[in-house]
Image (cartoon, rainbow, N blue to C red):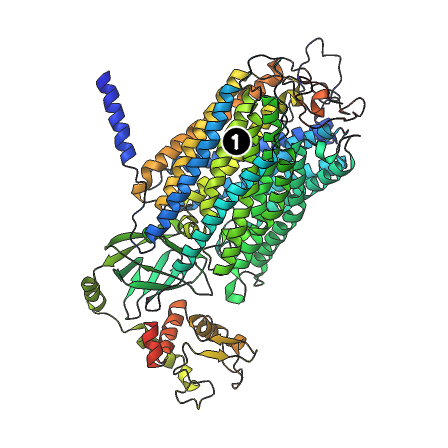
């Protein structure tokens, strides 16, 4: 009997130790996020504990002993009300400042991030490296290098989520969102789609492979790789006839795109916007929404003629013909 | 807990008395009734049925998730199950639960009125609810819907191949039932209080229902408009939400959460009102800090309209907008905390007894505290990024919605059951049921907090094997929880026929509703009472009359 009990306990113990309490932490921000998480866990247990203990104590101490008891008539207490309004407010204020400053820090990618492009599509992830390699549901990145992902969707809203990095961002059709991370440990980590996207939502998963710099260099240059994104974009630029108007010397019917990327551009509406991925995308799919003062509204829309991947290739090309200085910046 | 049962058999001494249940017989006398008490019972039966529908969907989901590859269904079927579970439980059970049943029954009784201000409108709102429910049930039978209860575009508008329109129409129609009910309550509470029943003598349940009614009439039209636009988009492709033709898919989320976050408080505020009644009665104490509890309900109702953006921290929303929504979300936590502290303090120096309704109330306080505090993880921007869209969210809102709202609903049903039916249920079974529900609930949802932190996304029909142990624990808990819900269903049914007569005030509670016989006569009060004292004046006498 005792041994049966014992084996029962050890069985339970095995199951309990099989439950991890903390997910793998493999990015520069993971430990900071976890510190906040565990502080909040502490606060939760502390206050739940206090409430439970107080209720239990009152339940026993003030249990009804006779049916004719006449309990004390207490209306309330202003000092207590003020105390238990201000103390939670103070704790909330501290947590708010802590969480927000951490979030702000985590939201800004370092200037020198390597950029990789992500396209979500029911139900797979397309990833494209500027150097040319394309991947499906797999992302190879070097360790200890900040990586910026620029993401868009071909169809519905998806969400790129890597629990080990503590990063997540929705991937939206028709616009770009971005996240960044810097992996700190080599290894293989889950990519999940974190926003319900239809039948095979749960299968829209993949792996991040974090590699040593040498392994990564071998991977990115190895095999029979394609041209870089910018080179593909350049061919596309010619194939779609963009180069008939956007002449490099500026003498065409459209503006020259050389050196344009990253510059502020004054629009006909009076608004000034930086030439970034979002603006170039908009110029391709909805050119009449961002007219330039000196040029007539003659550019046709390319919506439906190019898919999101090709838009990104065109953007890569436009970026590649930016000034040398900007080019190094964006790398 | 059904509506169209035969009226209970009277004990000999009571048999001569006419009350709202035996005043007339036959199905017509129920379907054409304008008595708020009978309409409350019509609602009780209908929402119990919908609770069973939603509960069966949940049971099947938990059964499916025992194995990483799923045991029972194709992914598409699983997606329909969680959608049905969410839509039915939120729009057809939780939103109407306490207001439409206990609220309908108690608002006139508690304020010393003979009925609501607009009795026919009240019956109409039940019919509207039924029509909305039928659309939804039709959609389930016709093939189901797989958008999630949140109907996010452009999936729902352009990609889903399921009965989106029928379900959206069902929710749209049911919304009008909420609006009519809210309107009825507000007018009734303003205009029909008994002489002497000033605002600060009102039971806190009335304050909570009043705050809820405000959200009903201000928030519900927004969800109606949103679903209407969704229907237009799906049918006519007019380009409101579809980015390919110039729309904005995130606009839908803004509109949806502008209603659906306040809707969370539609579901929890009435529960808070119930808890204030229960705690005072079973501690024989007036509520600690009456005005703080009352005003915290109003504060919650107002702030709840300003926090919707915390559902959208990871959508690419501006980080400065995130900042504002984060601070407002912390702000809404404070009145909730104030309530918890006041309920706890009410127990101090009380005379506490532990009948079943009190066990539900104490369970509510504990679980709501957990649910509220885990909300701080999601109001905090940095941690929300990791936890958003995972099982952590699922656990958090089930602690509020099931641990909070459903516990309060069951506590309220048990508390006022003797008044509703004139019968007592077996208290031992009721305490046992409450305990089973408490244990089953925690075993179901606590592991989900851990799953979410470990990174398991919600709405996954299959999942990586490392999450299995916690999923099995959760499913085991769900089976206990399911049994826990069946126990009250059985003995409450039993008590309608076989329970001993309750008498007018079995708990020796304060409040006008306890001054009439059980079940009350159709006109509630022979004479309209005159109120001369505060609510919960338990110190003055040991129960009984108060005016």
Quadrant of image for the N terminus of chain B: top right
- Relative to B184, is A4 on the left or the right? left
The answer to whether residue A148 is magenta is: no
Residue B358 lies in quadrant = top right
Question: Is B54 displayed left or right of B33 in the figure?
Answer: left
Please provide percent x and percent y for residue A225: 23, 70
Q: Secondary structure at mark 1?
A: helix
Q: Residue furthest top?
A: B12
Residue B69 placed where, x, y %? 33, 42
Q: Residue furthest front?
A: A79
> Residue visible at 72% across and 40% down?
B186
Question: Is residue A63 among what the camera can see?
Answer: yes
In the image: residue B163, left or right of residue B118: left
Q: Position of residue B457 (x, y in %)?
A: 39, 47
* Residue linked to disc 1: B364
Q: Nearer the viewer, residue B123 or B370?
A: B370
Q: Is the stretch drawn in magenta largely helix, strand or loop?
A: loop
Report if residue A234 is visible in the image.
no
Asked if residue A104 is positioned above or below residue B148 in the image, the reply reads below
Provide the residue span drawn in magenta: A109-114
Place residue A313 in its image quadrant: bottom left
**Which residue is at 45% across, 41% downward?**
B374
**Residue A113 in magenta?**
yes
Label 1: chain letter: B
């Amino acid at each position: 009997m005792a041994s049966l009990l014992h084996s029962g306990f050890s069985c339970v113990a095995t199951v309990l130790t099989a439950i991890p309490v903390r997910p793998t932490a493999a990015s520069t921000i993971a430990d900071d996020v976890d510190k906040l998480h565990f502080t909040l866990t502490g606060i939760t247990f502390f206050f739940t504990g206090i409430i439970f203990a107080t209720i239990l104590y009152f339940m026993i101490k003030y249990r009804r002993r006779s049916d004719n008891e006449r309990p004390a008539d207490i209306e309330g207490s202003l000092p207590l009300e003020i105390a238990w309004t201000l103390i939670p407010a103070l704790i909330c204020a501290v947590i708010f400042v802590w969480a927000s400053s951490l979030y702000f820090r985590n939201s800004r990618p370092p200037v020198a991030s390597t950029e990789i492009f992500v396209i979500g599509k029911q139900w797979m992830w397309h990833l494209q490296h500027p150097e040319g390699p394309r991947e499906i549901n797999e992302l190879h990145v070097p360790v200890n290098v900040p990586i910026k992902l620029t993401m868009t969707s071909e169809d519905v809203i998806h969400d790129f989520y890597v629990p080990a990095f503590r990063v997540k961002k929705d991937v939206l059709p028709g616009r770009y969102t971005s996240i960044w991370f810097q992996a700190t440990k080599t290894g293989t980590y889950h990519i999940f789609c974190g926003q319900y996207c239809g039948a095979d939502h749960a299968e829209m998963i993949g792996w991040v492979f974090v590699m040593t710099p040498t392994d990564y260099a071998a991977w990115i240059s190895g095999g029979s790789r394609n041209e870089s994104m910018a080179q593909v974009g350049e061919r596309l630029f010619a194939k779609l006839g963009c180069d008939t108007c956007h002449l490099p010397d500026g003498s065409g019917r459209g503006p020259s795109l050389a050196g344009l990327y990253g510059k502020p551009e004054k629009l006909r509406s009076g608004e000034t916007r930086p030439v970034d991925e979002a603006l170039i995308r908009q110029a391709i799919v909805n050119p009449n929404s961002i007219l330039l003062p000196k040029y007539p509204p003659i550019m046709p829309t390319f919506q439906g003629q190019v898919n999101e991947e090709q838009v990104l290739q065109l953007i890569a090309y436009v970026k590649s013909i930016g000034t040398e200085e900007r080019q190094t910046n964006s790398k | 807990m059904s509506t169209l049962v035969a009226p209970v058999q009277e004990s000999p001494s009571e048999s001569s008395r006419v009350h709202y249940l035996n005043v007339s017989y036959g199905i017509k006398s129920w379907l054409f009734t304008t008595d708020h008490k009978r309409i409350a019972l019509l609602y009780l039966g209908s929402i119990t049925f919908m609770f069973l529908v939603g509960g069966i969907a949940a049971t099947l989901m938990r059964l499916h998730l025992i194995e990483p590859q799923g045991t029972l269904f194709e992914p598409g079927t699983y997606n329909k199950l969680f959608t049905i579970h969410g839509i039915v439980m939120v729009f057809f059970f939780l939103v109407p639960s306490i207001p439409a049943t206990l609220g309908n029954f108690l608002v006139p009784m508690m304020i010393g009125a003979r009925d609501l201000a607009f009795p026919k409108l009240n019956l109409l709102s039940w019919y509207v609810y039924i029509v909305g429910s039928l659309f939804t049930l039709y959609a389930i039978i016709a093939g189901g819907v797989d958008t999630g209860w949140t109907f996010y575009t452009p999936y729902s508008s352009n990609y889903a191949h399921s009965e989106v329109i029928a379900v959206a129409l069902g929710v749209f129609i049911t919304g009008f039932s909420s609006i009519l009910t809210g309107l009825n309550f507000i007018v009734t509470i303003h205009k029909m209080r008994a002489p002497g029943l000033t605002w600060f003598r009102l039971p806190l349940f009335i304050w909570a229902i009043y705050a809820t009614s405000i959200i009903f009439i201000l928030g519900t039209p927004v969800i109606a408009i949103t679903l209407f636009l969704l229907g237009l988009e799906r049918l006519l492709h007019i380009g409101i939400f579809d980015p390919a033709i110039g729309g904005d898919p995130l606009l839908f989320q803004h509109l949806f959460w502008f209603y659906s976050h306040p809707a969370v408080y539609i579901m929890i505020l009435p529960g808070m009102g119930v808890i204030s009644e229960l705690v005072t009665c079973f501690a024989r104490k007036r509520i600690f800090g009456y005005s703080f509890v009352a005003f915290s309900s109003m504060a919650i109702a107002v702030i709840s309209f300003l926090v919707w953006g915390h559902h959208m921290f990871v959508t690419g929303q501006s980080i400065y907008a995130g900042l504002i929504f984060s601070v407002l979300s912390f702000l809404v936590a404070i009145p909730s905390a104030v309530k918890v502290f006041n309920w706890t303090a009410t127990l101090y120096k009380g005379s506490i007894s532990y009948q079943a309704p009190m066990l539900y109330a104490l369970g509510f306080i504990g679980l709501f505290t957990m649910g509220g505090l885990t909300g701080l993880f999601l109001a905090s921007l940095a941690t929300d990024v990791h936890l958003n869209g995972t099982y952590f969210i699922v656990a958090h809102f089930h602690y509020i919605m099931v641990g909070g709202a459903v516990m309060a609903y069951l506590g309220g049903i048990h508390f006022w059951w003797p008044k509703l039916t004139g019968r007592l249920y077996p208290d031992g079974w009721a305490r046992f049921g409450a305990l089973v529900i408490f244990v089953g609930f925690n075993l179901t949802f606590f592991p989900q907090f851990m799953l979410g932190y470990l990174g398991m996304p919600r709405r996954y029909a299959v999942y990586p094997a490392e999450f299995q142990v916690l999923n099995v624990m959760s499913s085991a808990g769900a089976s206990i929880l399911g049994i826990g819900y069946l126990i009250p269903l059985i003995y409450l049914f039993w008590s309608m026929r076989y329970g001993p007569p309750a008498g007018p005030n079995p708990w020796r509670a304060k409040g006008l509703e306890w001054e009439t016989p059980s079940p009350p006569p159709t006109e509630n009060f022979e004479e309209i009472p005159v109120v001369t004292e505060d609510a919960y004046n338990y110190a003055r006498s040991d129960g009984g009359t108060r005016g």
